[in-house]
Image: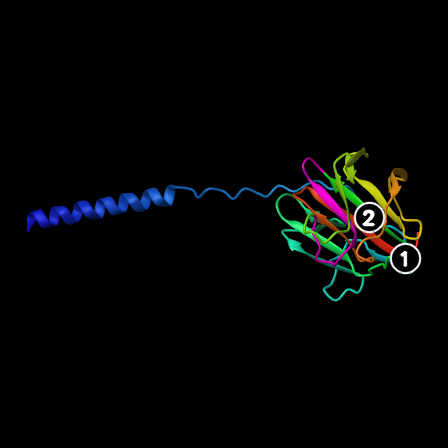
Amino acid sequence: MKKLLTVAVLALTAAALTFAQSCGRSEPEETAKETVALPDHVTADYDTEWAYAGMDRQIPSDDGDFAVTGSGFVYRGGWLGVDGDGYFDLACLREPGSEESFTFCFDAYTEGDGSLRIGLWLYSVDSLPGDGSGGVWLSYSDGQIADNGESHTVPKGAASVRVQMDAPGQRLRVYVNGDLVIDRACAPENGGGAVKIISGKGPAFISNAAFRMGI
């Protein structure tokens, strides 16, 4: 009986010590997710012939001009984008035909490995680079824009991008901060079609997306 009592006391003591140690152990603190410090958002001024999304508010699912899909993207400070992993896909729902010129504008902000892909005359709003559905794709990253195998230097940080497609003249022109960086022959593909921006890995953000028929 005495032996059983001793074993019980020892078991209770061990349990008490374990409980005390567990109460004294602090749980690991959750590391706050780092976010990119974005430039101040400045609302652009477009008239009614433009489809416009300032990104200072979420684009609704029933919007008639733009559709946003993706994973891990945020609306923050007047910008739409991704800080790290994740992506967003912004499609313009006004699809130009093969004989319709158009202008597509947006503000871009990328850092490090962050990048954006700009698609023109795509087969559909679901088209992706390299999926075989054709179209014209530009790649925009921090300090560089690439098109048709050629790279062009652009300012780092935030920049205003203006894409003009002259359909009858079959010419593509791209301006960054008002400077012409791309000017080349460009025949329409797919009989015309969707215009969109998708992000690669962040940091990659856009703001003030605007689209109209005509240049």
Q: Secondary structure at mark 2?
A: strand
Q: Identify which residue, 172 or 118, lies in the foreground.
A: 172
Which residue is rendered at x = 77% and y = 51% of the image?
Answer: 135
Q: Identify which residue, 13 or 119, lies in the foreground.
A: 119
Which residue position is annotated with label 1? 99
Which residue is rendered at x = 74% and y = 48% of the image?
Answer: 77
Please name the amino acid that badge 2 sits on. Answer: Phe
Please name the amino acid that badge 1 sits on. Answer: Glu
Q: Secondary structure at mark 1?
A: loop
- What colour-coding does the image apply? rainbow
The answer to whether 202 appears left or right of 44 in the picture is: left
The part of the chain drawn in magenta is 111-129
On the image, the x and y values in percent for residue 191 come to 82, 58
Of the image marks 1 and 2, the number of the one nearer the N terminus: 1
Residue 17 part of the magenta-drawn span: no
On the image, the x and y values in percent for residue 51 come to 85, 58
Which residue position is annotated with label 2? 106
Q: Are marks 1 and 2 in contact (CB under 8 Å)?
A: no
